[in-house]
Image: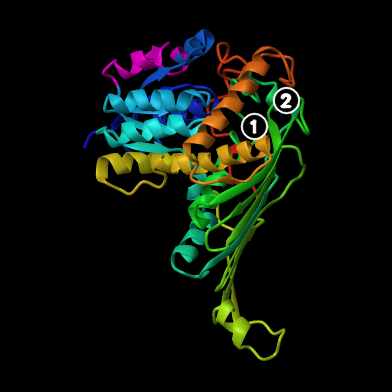
Amino acid sequence: MKNLRVGIIGVGNIGGAHAESIFSGRIRGMDLCGLCDAAPEKRQYLAGKYPGIPVFDDGLKLMDSGLVDTLIVATPHYFHPVYAAEALKRGLNVLSEKPAGVGVRAVKEVICAAEQSHGAYGIMFNQRTDPLFRKAKEIIDGGGLGEPKRLVWIITNWYRTQKYYDSGTWRATWNGEGGGVLLNQAPHNLDVWQWLFGMPDAVTAFVTEGKYHNIGVEDDATIYAEYGNGATAVFITTTGEAPGTNRLEISGSLGKIVIEKGVLSYTKLGVSERDFCFRDGSGSSLPPLEEFSFGPYEAVSGHELILANFAASVLEGERLIAPGIDGIRELSISNAAYLSSWTGRTVRLPLDESDVEAFEELLENKRQCERAGEGSGRGDAGSTAGNVCDKDISTGNNYLPRWNVKW
């Protein structure tokens, strides 16, 4: 079967890294056949770097060119669902960068388009390929933790300096990105949270804007979540702590998983803790247990694994590691977290129509204030009309270390 003919819309850092991987022949099943970017200087650069690859100034022109059957969407966040839906309506395959969008309503429209399309829909949740997360998934899905009790994730090593936020006019703005750490860095972790532990039923959150940086969006967030069976989750993230921590702990009735510093520690109980609690006569002894350790493993190129898996899924029927429909799950958690923090109340999941409308209204208020120059944090309006890629147009050639799982 012929390779997928891939077009990329939005060729900034991450889009450029995807282009380089495909163009160099490292992705089995993919050929680079078209590129698109809004910035004239970027298009000129791309034409020189990728001779023979057509470069477009409009995403719809790329989709309608007949040159591609697969689209990678790597634009700023608001445009992810816009281009994904348009491509799916045309029967193209779509692999979207994370997040799937800024609000769940737009992503629901993409899912509807995918259900009616002949094209495949995937999302770039590359951290699902990490060997430690995959091992945790294997243990949990195999019943190794029993009934879920608690998840605690301290993920504070997403450190960013002010220079990072100043590197593009769309960064760290409500109009450009649609949010801060919860929309840019933490979608990977929110996805892995729900992938391993399931979707919560209620969220209470505290989201702080511009706590550590001169920005108008959040750079610090704490989420408390509740589940129908009584389980709870606590998620803490920020871009303002150095050196930061990445520690994931998941507990259940049959044991515990801790992932930290590149190692997964698994404690397996010989009997259910719930049974032991009410049958043991000592009052303070622990159930019988065994301890196992996995890792450290060699680093994997998660982005390239997702690209190769997407091609294999379309061409050979391989199961998708990250189906596009999963994008609405982590986005639902972040939308609920914003809404909870902005209103000071607990938000139920899945979001009902009134909460979707409330989120959209409050977000639009922030966007309007930002455009008016009120509270943007950097004195700019955060417009998406200007440069939508990083200022240094030559950097998007390789996957940057900051995108890897860091322990």
Which contiguous range is marked in magenta?
Answer: 47-67
Check the image and name the residue furthest to the front.
354
Quadrant in the picture for residue 267: bottom right
Alpha carbon separation for disc pair 2 and 1: 9 Å
In the image, is residue 64 part of the stretch drawn in magenta?
Answer: yes
State whether residue 365 is above or below residue 329.
above
Decide: few, some or many residues near mark 2? Use Cα within 10 Å; few <14, some 14-19, many ≥20.
many
Dot 2 corresponds to which residue? 215
Decide: few, some or many residues near mark 1? Use Cα within 10 Å; few <14, some 14-19, many ≥20.
many
Instruction: Tell me which residue sits at (58%, 34%) in the image.
Output: 183
Instruction: Tell me which residue sits at (52%, 39%) in the image.
Output: 331
Check the image and name the residue furthest to the left.
1
Instruction: Tell me which residue sits at (61%, 27%) in the image.
Output: 362
Dot 1 corresponds to which residue? 180
Question: Would residue 86 appear left or right of 374 to someone viewing this image?
Answer: left
Query: In front here: 56 or 45?
Result: 56
- Secondary structure beneath label 1: loop
- Residue 172, horizontal then vertical, whole percent: 66, 25
